[in-house]
Image (cartoon, helix red, strand yellow):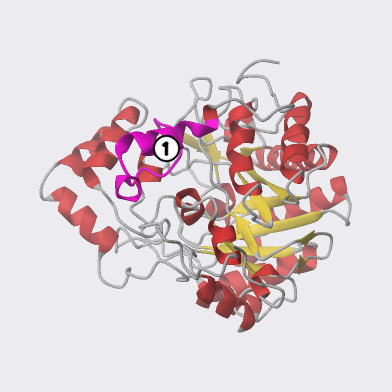
Amino acid sequence: MRADMTDDIIFQPLRFRNLTIPNRILRSNIAGKFDGYDGSGSQTRINWELKFARNGVGAIVSSWVGVDLRGRIVPGYASIYRDDQIPFWRELGKQVHEYDCKYILQLAHAGRQRDVPGFEIAKALTSTRKQDPLHGFPSEQMTVDDIKQVTRSFAAAARRVREAGLDGIEIHGANGYLFTQFLSSAINDRKDDYGGSLENRARLLLEVVRAIRSEVGDDFHLQVKISAVEHANASLPWDKKGNTIEDSKQVCQWLEKAGVDAIHVSTGSTFPHPYNPAGQFHLREAADSYSYLLTSGKHTLRNYLGMRTFPVNQFFKWRWNRPGRKQTEGALLPDAAAIKSVVSIPVLCTGGFQSASMIRNAITTGKCDAVTIGRPLVANNDLVEQFRAGRDRPALPCTFCNRCLNNVLQHPLGCYDESRYPNRQAMIDEIMSVYGSPEPGNNWPNPGSR
């Protein structure tokens, strides 16, 4: 039975300059390897998105969508670097819209931070000559011509988003991907107009915003996700700290002036990062999953052995879970509030939200205008409907065990916390449900077919 939520701020529409969504909860950018190796979309991805659309979220931010084959994080994610990919996204948007849910496509480029390199890509493009520090995948510093080409790729992808009839765009400028690699004082060591000062480090992101506006006009929703504080020394204390909240406040003011309609606040100079996704780290499970990459990078064998070898693995676990990292839900609200204090556009905040009272308080006290949710919605697809029924917190809340992300490189995305299910088979059935038959009338080709 639904409670009367007429006056509840969570269920009030959020009006951006060019878009209105029906409530203040967005599904954050999260999805699995549901698609073709070449980036073609599948019915499985549509089924995944419908799990959240039919359960009441106001909008969905798509998972990581590559604008360039060379810039993808992993094969098997739907992309938008070709015009013949537009019909898939049009069909996905059409089906999501049937549930009064908006769909915002996240445009992204990995730079050097790839999870699984494709066989056809030798080196990743990035801001620096330094290779990817985690896996040791080879990379090369972008030339100015490379930068201009990537800017054109974002603009062309934005055009495709609008032609597909979707509701807006999010530029992924956070969590260690290409724009972080330029923005970050801990990563960007260039000596040209794209390095050095904060203004120079922000140049690529601002040029991409202006190129997108030139391509799609001023009347189409455009937001940017940013790591408000990078904490680049969170894992290794001798590393540089990276950008501060003061740096990000200035960048967000520039973004607003350039025509951005909203800021999406996240954290961390890499992904994964001790602050993101906050929660538990299961070394054995992570090592088992990581074995998939053993032959892919210079550091992968080192990482794998480190995760399995005592006492190295205990040091890593301590750095990840050390005191001061206990809060997960709402941990980024101070950063969101700081950015909201200097911009006039809406501010979205991510960070483990699954309590209606905390979301309600965050909005009414002016810390943010809406929240984006990933793992708690994976655990409880009907979280919004539980709030609507008057429940403050789900009956079986997300435990932030991070097993969903431990499994995502090899297995379907879903909740792998067996304690939340009556038995293991029930868990498997739920995870595999996205591979079931589409609803009547909804049938997109299998991955890779055209």
Q: Quadrant of the C terminus?
A: top right
Residue located 48% across and 71% down the image:
330
Q: How many marks?
A: 1
Q: Residue furthest front?
A: 1
Q: Which residues are magenta?
A: 409-434
In the rendered view, would you say 337 is above or below 159?
Answer: below
In the rendered view, would you say 414 is above or below 295?
Answer: below
Q: Quadrant of the N terminus?
A: bottom right
* Image spot of residue 198 (x, y percent): 60, 66
Q: Is residue 48 left or right of residue 408?
A: right
Q: The disc labelled 1 sits on which kind of residue?
A: Val
Q: Is residue 2 left or right of residue 96?
A: left
* Image spot of residue 31 (x, y percent): 53, 41
Q: Residue furthest bottom?
A: 365
Judge by depth and name the residue closer to the eye, 247 or 337.
337
Q: Which residue is mark 1?
A: 408
Visible residue check, residue 424:
yes
Residue located 26% across and 34% down the image:
288
Q: Residue furthest left?
A: 310
* Image spot of residue 235 (x, y percent): 31, 58
Q: Is disc 1 placed on a helix, strand or loop?
A: loop
Residue located 52% across and 34% down the image:
124
Q: Is residue 425 magenta?
A: yes
